[in-house]
Image: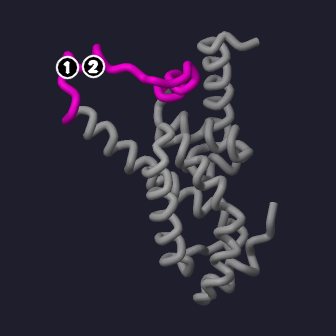
Amino acid sequence: MTDFAADTRLAQQGDTAAFARLYETVYKDLYHTAYYSLRSNEHDAADAVSETVMDAFASMKNLKNPEAFRSWIFRILSAKIKRRQQEYYKEAKELMPQDAAEDFSYVSSELRVVLDALHPTDRLILSLSVLCGYTGEEIGRICEMQPGTVRSRLSRLKAALRVQLQCE
């Protein structure tokens, strides 16, 4: 893992090039996490990442531990994702009458259907672990959960997915 301390300190002093270097190390993971957490919606994922980067740049001075840049920016992203997911549920209730739900179908793979059925927090934990390679401790800091809780939820999630997808 990269040492973010020097660039973080420079970015906290307003160095945009240092912030750009920091962003360059995390942008793919930010986007992948947002993309899979937001049900593969490219536009919402890009918007969430953009908002995250703007908020992170604006509040760099608030980062107390320069070594924690990566988990700090993912906490910001997590908040953006949760806010968008809440908007999805509000929109779905407003747009879809009771009887229309029966006609709704995904034009996607079995995996997408299973992932879409997950609780938003579970989808975020799974994305951070599987796609980004974060440990239980790192995910715990991002999601503001105990590392043991993250590991047990992840274990149960993977077991349930294996059963649902009939994997060996």
Q: Is residue 116 above or below residue 50?
A: above
Mark 2 residue element: helix
Assign the C terminus to one quadrant of the image. top right
Where is residue 151, by image quadrant?
top right
Residue 82 on image: x %, y % = 43, 47
Q: Which residue is mark 1?
A: 98
Point out the stretch of residues depicted in magenta.
Answer: 94-117
Lateral position of residue 113 relative to residue 12, left or right: left
How is the structure coloured here?
A: one colour
Q: Which mark is residue 9?
A: none
Residue type of the residue flagged with mark 2: Ala
In this rendering, the answer to whether 97 lies above or below 86 is above
Is residue 114 shown in magenta?
Answer: yes
Which residue was labeled with disc 2? 101
Kindly give the residue lying farthest to the front in the view shown: 107
- Local SS, label 1: helix
Numbered marks: total: 2
**Residue 84 in the image, given as x and y percentages of width and height:** 38, 48
- Side (left or right) of 168 relative to 162: right
Q: Measuring 74% from the left and 76% from the top, which residue is drawn there? A: 5
